[in-house]
Amino acid sequence: MLQRFRKRLRRRKQVEVPERPIVVDGARKSSGNQTRNRITLVMIGACLVYAIIAGRLIQYGFRDLAMVSGIARGSELLASRPDLLDRNGQVLATDIRTVSLYAKPHKITDPDEVIERLSTVLPELDVRTVYRKLTSKSQFQWLRRQLTPKQQNDILALGIPGVGFRPEKRRFYPGGPTASHIVGHVNIDNKGIAGMEKYVDGQGLADLAAVGMTIEQQLEPVRLSVDLRVQHIVRDELSAAMQRYRAIAAGAVVLNAKTGEVLAMSSLPDYDPNIPAQALEKDRLNRMSAGTYEMGSTFKAFTTAMALDSGLVTMKDSFDARRPIRIAGHTISDFHGKHRVLTVPEIFIYSSNIGTAKMADVVGIQGQRDFLTRIGLLTRMPTELPEVTRPSQPKVWKKINSITISFGHGVATTPLQTAMAAAAMLNGGNLIPPTFLPRSEEEALRIATRVIKPETSANMRYLMRLNVKKGSGRRAEVPGFRVGGKTGTAEKVVNGRYSSSVRFNAFLSAFPIEDPQFVVLVVIDEPKPAEGQRSATAGLNAAPTVKAIIRRSAALLGVRPSFGEGEDALLVSY
């Protein structure tokens, strides 16, 4: 029994008290390895996080460096505009590099501080507007466009986070207002919005900028027909005339009668295209192509040409100008009436309203309307300049309309349009659209339209020369250059009625008149009598202004003076 119990006890001990495991030390090591692995993973994760942060900081650092330095890649620059040059290569408009200030509102932590610091450099900042921009939810806001280099450097020195500079192109006009209405100007985004700047955009430059394309190299310059030297003379003489005659406005154009090229055109008051906001001020419009006016007695030249070209009137015909014309409650009389029968040349040099009206009556209403349309005075003038206004005319032409239109009342045209028609009347009969781009005589002839007979043109050259020698245009005479011309003193409408004391004066001329190379037209709006004069008709102010322009510019235009016998062969031939 006892032995059997001992055996059973030994078996129980073997089951209940197993041998001590030999893996106790290995478990401790395994636990330690797991801890080390976890620490290593945490460290690697931390390093990765810090590496990402460092990478982003470096990325932002480079971006901010480019932002603050104001230097960007060529692909980030705005598309360049081509330079505008005059016919002799003088720069009228060019691009200069500048920078503009912007902000990223989501990076601005204290808008008040930013405004306070920026105001030390840009004191004229609109605080409310800038604050609204800095607190907006957008990621980009312009703060100031086209800074000066000094302003850029001063803002850089402030070291303001969240603001930067973007390179831009700014248009610069070296001549200032000299040719402003021809050249035009651009907006803040360097897009042409007036004058030849707008025309250039219309030739494809605007489309290029719209699709985001940029050009690294300088674009080919655009050469205009304008002669900057003559342009300066024209503007200078107009400015002097406005002051001398206390006029509210003045304008002039010098047009090549053979090609239609505009050599100079000015309208005062004008503006400085470097300060585009001036163009929006009152009375700064381009009167020469965007304003329409009743041109007064200068229209008598077209009425005379119409009558002669019709074949119904000859240079030897006469018309009774002894008594005024009474029609529809109106009385048509002459300003300086001769009260006798006048020949066609006398009607012209004495500027007879009565004689001119009777010549128009011979042609008839429809014939008159057709002629003025054919010579380009009743339709919109084709040219590159965007600022061109359509002439105005009566909806229904009655007899009274025909009579008043014959001497320049009732139809309003642009002065440039009048010069274009005058060139056709004097150059042999070819109507050539005016251009602000270079054009050869051969090119002009290809697009010209014959509107009057060559013999009619020869007769008109004679009459205009005669008017300067013996008529109302005597003060336009320039010795050696044989000027021909026609005055126009138009009464302006005031409170619905024509006023005899408020005038729009014009002098239409050409030289040398035997073979006209250039047409010169001067208009003066509401002139007053000059010192020592009692009247302010066109012969007393517009004609002398034409004389001054021709005297100073003829040599620059390549016209050589001719003195002595034979200088008036044109008059002798008649």
Image: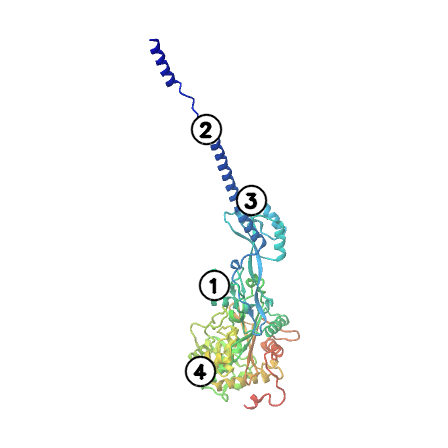
Identify the amino acid type marked 2.
Gly
Labelled disc at residue 363: 4
What is the secondary structure assignment of the residue under circle 2?
Answer: helix
**Disc 1 residue type (three-letter):** Leu
Question: Is residue 423 at least partly visible in the picture?
Answer: yes
**In the image, residue 463 lies at what x, y percent?**
54, 85
Counting from the top left corner in percent of width and height, residue 352 is at: 53, 81
Mark 3 or mark 1: whose residue is earlier in sequence: 3
| Badge 4: residue crowd in 10 Å (few <14, some 14–19, many ≥20) | many
Q: Quadrant of residue 270?
A: bottom right
Label 1: state its secondary structure.
helix
In three-dimensional space, the C-alpha distance between marks 2 and 1, rounded to whole angstroms, equals: 77 Å
Q: Earlier in the sequence, mark 3 or mark 2?
A: 2
Say the numbered circle drawn on residue 184. Answer: none
Mark 1 vs 4: CB contact within 8 A: no
Residue at label 3? 109
Identity, as a three-letter code, of the amino acid under mark 4: Val
Q: Quadrant of residue 367?
A: bottom left
**Residue wearing tag 1:** 208
